[in-house]
Amino acid sequence: MLEAMEGVVARGRFAKAALEIAMFDAWARSSDVPVRSLLGGAVGDSIECTWALGAMPLEEMVAEFDCWRRIVTAVSR
């Protein structure tokens, strides 16, 4: 499936990442396990990451950040 995706979105790194995450999520949900179990288990209690906000008006950046903050909070439960 990942090879087929590569042919469709070869240069779309963010699109590929989103699809890959969605596939892991679907696999984990169908197996009734957390995604971390599919990837070998937890190795820590946090993940460092960088968030790149696009060039947009401040209100939109704050709304985008808020959306991702809610997602990260929900996932970390």
Image (cartoon, rainbow, N blue to C red):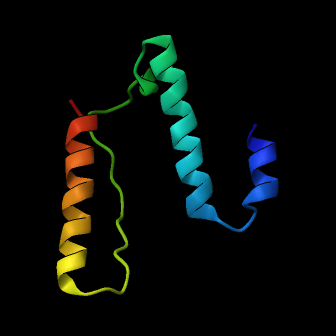
Q: How many marks?
A: 0
Drawn side of residue 36 relative to residue 18, left or right: left
Residue at the image position 33 percent from the left and 52 percent from the top: 48
Residue 10 visible in the picture: yes
Residue at the image position 76 percent from the left and 62 percent from the top: 10
Please state the horizontal and vertical placement of residue 76, each as a whole percent of the image: 24, 35
Please state the horizontal and vertical placement of residue 62, each as a whole percent of the image: 18, 72
Drawn side of residue 77 relative to residue 20, left or right: left
Give 27 or 47, whichever is nearer the viewer: 27
Q: For residue 27, what is the image quadrant?
A: top right
Drawn side of residue 18 relative to residue 47, left or right: right
Q: For residue 33, what is the image quadrant?
A: top left
**Vertical order, 15 against 26 (above or below):** below
Please state the horizontal and vertical placement of residue 3, each as a whole percent of the image: 81, 44
**Vertical order, 64 against 61 (above or below):** above
Quarter of the image with the C terminus in it = top left
**Vertical order, 45 against 41 (above or below):** below
Drawn side of residue 38 relative to residue 4, left or right: left
Quarter of the image with the N terminus in it = top right
Give 39 or 4, whichever is nearer the viewer: 4
Residue 39 visible in the picture: no
Residue at the image position 28 percent from the left and 36 percent from the top: 75
Q: For residue 2, what is the image quadrant?
A: top right
Please state the horizontal and vertical placement of residue 7, each as a whole percent of the image: 82, 55
Residue at the image position 26 percent from the left and 66 percent from the top: 64
